[in-house]
Amino acid sequence: MSATDPSNSPYDAVVIGGGPAGLQAALTLGRMHRRVLLLDSGEYRNAPAEHMHNFVTQDGTPPAEFRAAARADLAAYATVAVREAAATAVVPHGAGFRVELGGDAEGGEPLATRTVVLATGMRDTLPATPGLEPLFGTVAAVCPYCHGHELSGKHVAVLGSGPHVTRVAFLLERIASRLTVLADGEELDPGVRAQLADAGVAVRAEAVKELVPSAAGATVSFTDGPDEEVGGVFVSAEFAQRAPFAEQLGLDLLSSGAVEVDAMGRTSVPGVFAAGDMAHTPATPMPLASVLAAASSGLMAAVAVDAELLGQDHPVPQPA
């Protein structure tokens, strides 16, 4: 029997991704004494963020500290293993799957597993505004629920001209002392302009030349007109799958670009589960970029994995 035959596999599940969704999935499976391997590539969507927020008991915790504490939790479970390695492919194989590792991974031979939990997250593409990327995760952010409160009483800018502008501005109007939309040379819809004006939100129509760190947060310079000093900037980022596994496996995707899952994290391919912001149900309009939501979805996916394995090991007799 081949060493990569899932029926001879040392793993009930391989969890790909070492963020909150993957860590929680591994913990839940470990507590049920499932043989689980967590593969952590060392890449995380929230790596630019200095602190996590809006997570009870973890508000203000640096993401790296959260991951270290989670790793310490996993170390208490004998059936859980963690490897610093990047998976490069997931391939159906026999009754399970073969997970291939990067060539530099120690012991890079393929792994066999009965099930797979994908928790690889999304990759953000920011607007090409000069100076924005170095500020992302500190002065610049995408989510008012995660990073809005820290800008209380400050002048906050919303960059862009798309449909996100009014929603983000109105979410922040109780928090910021002053709001300015940076249309960056683009035309705002007249109805949007009227809404913003009614709410007392200023609009700078000029193209943004550059964002420069300042003592207050950032200085916004324009191709024409005076600079604006702001405490923070909210942007709309485009996102896509960080890893190639959804495409490799032919998983169903939603219009958001995320993997379609049911409420338990099951994908369109039996034996493959997805958790975190790389996936969501059709009832949810977009993936939630939230550490707490990611961890919760990791737990649900792990419960579904355990149920599937239980059904394989102890099939329920069908009525005659």
Image (tube, rainbow, N blue to C red):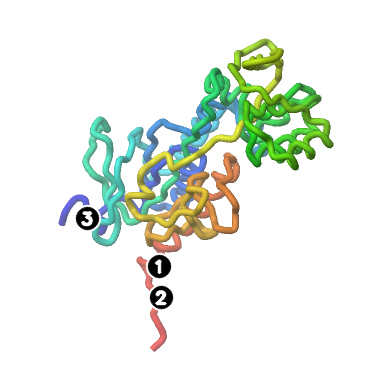
Q: Quadrant of the N terminus?
A: bottom left
In this rendering, position of residue 71 left or right of residue 198: left
Q: Circle 2 sits on which residue? A: 316
In this rendering, position of residue 272 left or right of residue 228: left
SS at circle 1:
helix
Q: Residue furthest top?
A: 215
Lower sequence index among marks 2 and 3: 3
Position in image of residue 308 (x %, y %): 41, 63
The residue nearer to you, when weighing 131 against 249, is 131
- Kindly identify the residue that appears in the image at 19 percent across and 50 percent down: 3
Q: CA distance from mark 2 to mark 1?
A: 7 Å
- Kindly identify the residue that appears in the image at 58 percent across and 24 percent down: 50
Q: Residues within 10 Å of mark 2 (few under 14, many from 20)?
A: few
Disc number for residue 311 = 1
Asked whether disc 2 touches disc 1, contact meaning CB atoms under 8 Å apart, the reply is yes
Against 128, residue 286 (above or below) is below
Q: Quadrant of the C terminus?
A: bottom left
SS at circle 3:
loop
Q: CA distance from mark 1 to mark 3?
A: 20 Å
Q: Residue furthest bottom?
A: 320
Asked whether disc 2 touches disc 3, contact meaning CB atoms under 8 Å apart, the reply is no
Position in image of residue 192 (x %, y %): 73, 40
